[in-house]
Amino acid sequence: MANTYKNAMFDLTATTKTSVYTCPANTTALIKTIQVTNIDSGNQELESFVTDSSNSNAEHEIAHVTIASKTVDNIAKGTIVLEAGDVLKLQAATANKIAGIISLVEIDF
């Protein structure tokens, strides 16, 4: 069993749900932070979702936040556990205003 620390950077260039991380097969991922930056001069809304591959790909909203102008926030308020095949998605209300980085550890088994 190996632990691999990773990051996944993203730039939300559309207003549709965007897959920003998919947990690989035979792996559990522990997401520690989802750091988001509002690069615009106005407030921006952001939603995050997880698709649960072990539950018929049911999708669950895990956060809905408003990020103030020119600020950074961590929308993961605790560790988020993803199983193999689970997908983390983000959706911005306005394109090209939100960017960020996800910090995580993958545990292979």
Image: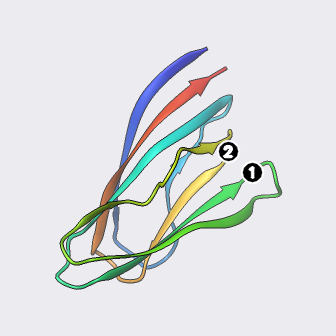
Three-letter residue code for mark 2: Gly
Residue 14 falls in image quadrant: bottom left
Measured in 3D between alpha carbons, the distance from the residue under mark 1 to the one under mark 2, in whole angstroms, is: 5 Å
In the displayed structure image, the side of residue 80 where residue 60 appears, left or right: right
Residue drawn 68% across the image and 39% down it: 84
In primary-sequence order, the first of circles 1 and 2 is 1
| 12 versus 56 height, above or below | below
| Most foreground residue, 93 or 71 | 71
**What residue is disc 1 on?**
53
Image coords of residue 8 (percent x, y): 39, 45
| Label 1 residue SS | loop
Three-letter residue code for mark 1: Ser
- Judged from this view, the residue extending furthest toward the front is 77
User: Quick one: label 1, few (<14), some, or many (20+) residues within 10 Å?
Assistant: some
| 12 versus 8 height, above or below | below
Quadrant (top left/top right/bottom left/bottom right) for the N terminus: top right
Residue drawn 49% across the image and 76% down it: 16
Quadrant (top left/top right/bottom left/bottom right) for the C terminus: top right
In the displayed structure image, the side of residue 62 where residue 33 appears, left or right: left
Mark 1 touching mark 2, by CB under 8 A?
A: yes
Residue drawn 67% across the image and 44% down it: 85
Image coords of residue 106 (percent x, y): 53, 30
**What residue is disc 2 on?**
85
Image coords of residue 47 (percent x, y): 50, 72
In the displayed structure image, the side of residue 31 where residue 37 appears, left or right: left
Colouring convention used in this rendered image of the protein: rainbow
| Most foreground residue, 49 or 73 | 73
Residue 42 falls in image quadrant: bottom left
**Which mark is drawn over residue 70?**
none
User: Quick one: label 2, few (<14), some, or many (20+) residues within 10 Å?
Assistant: some
| Label 2 residue SS | loop
| 76 versus 103 height, above or below | below
